[in-house]
Amino acid sequence: MPRVWILQSPHSGDNTQLRAISAALGWPFEVKRLSYRRSEGLLRLFSLATLAGVDRAGSSALAAPWPDLVIASGRGAEAVCFWLKRQNPKLRIVFVGTPWSALAKFDLVITTPQYRLPQAPNVLHNLLPLHDVTPQRIADEAARWEERLRHLPRPFTAVLVGGSSGPYLFTPEAARRLGQAASALASADGGSLLITTSARTGLVQADALAASLTVPHVMHRWGEAGQDNPFHAFLGLARQIVVTADSISMMAEAASTGKPVLLFDIEDGRFAMRAEGEGQAPIGWRGRSADATLFRALINVAPPRFSRDLRVVHRQLIAAGLAQWLGEAPAAPAGLPPGDELSRSAARIRGLFGL
């Protein structure tokens, strides 16, 4: 059986995918936590096989026996993968997302549409990121939380809240719009809201959202000490799910339930995701901030590895009947076949070993 290392990413969404793949493979694995030096960003430009960008004292040990398979995400891990390849020339490298280095340097790249990677024998294109949401986990968590939420009127509408992402800013005003729209949706049903924020939401935005709510609700604030995370329970108990359209991970998790998924545009007017989502029109150059403007410029003129275009995902989700924009008639529940893309990804990795 192959010896497997997972190189942990700084991003929680990446790590969710790595955990899901590891579980689907069913092989024993070691998780290697990596801490990076400031110089790492510069070193990645050269696609070197080096540990010079790694803070060895703050990272997991990287020592023999060497792995046969390394699964990684996050561009800082690329140099580590290539260094490990020098230690074991037979090493298979699987990268999740979009790498900085040439695709040919990887045995398999598992990617999604926003990265706009080309078709290639070693690239697996999935519609949405992989995740660890399963029907059993949702059912178990829903049962565990049902009594705690019995005081709220049904039906429930779940609200999954992300934050600013690339060219799109999640401002306090956007948070208020979300609270008002979600409240109107629940009020029309005579029900309640089950809300959870995330690492990118921001305290000011979370406060603005909370202040705008006008219906019965429970709001879980990400990161508050001692709180039991109800994310999977909310997916299981909700009749429909509102998700901010900045988070492809939460869109994937919501779509996997087969329930109506309503995308909330965190921008509006000429900056809106939806306004720029028709056909293949280029994204507008001007953003609400210097950083947002830079991201828009990269989407328009730079190679795909420099940016990601979330509008591609929105279009494909809606075309597949898996989501609709909030305010439009919801599509008939379709959902992704549970475990389909995950099983396909695991099968491709096993194939690297002739299994």
Image (cartoon, rainbow, N blue to C red):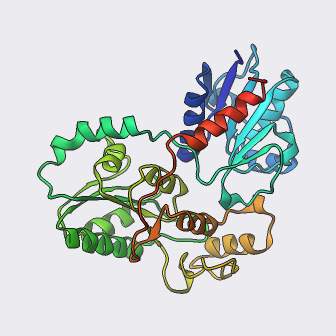
Taking 286 as reference, is 112 above or below it?
above
| Relative depth, front residue between 346 and 73 | 346
Left of 302 or right of it: where is 38?
left
Against 302, residue 68 (above or below) is above
Report the residue at 20% width, 71% height from top.
Answer: 187
Residue 11: x %, y % from top left: 57, 46
Does 238 sit above or below residue 55?
A: below
Any part of residue 127 in sight:
yes
Q: 275 or 164: nearer the eye?
A: 275
Q: Which residue lies at the image location 54% right of the left edge and 57% below the top edge?
A: 248
Please say if 202 is above or below 12: below
The quarter of the image holding the C terminus is: top right
The quadrant in which the N terminus is found is top right
Picture coordinates of residue 298, whole percent (x, y): 74, 70
Q: Which of the 4 quarters of the picture holds residue 21?
A: top right
Instruction: Measuring from the top left, give residue 94's x and y in whole percent.
Output: 74, 36
Question: What residue do we see at 41% from left, 64% from top?
Answer: 332
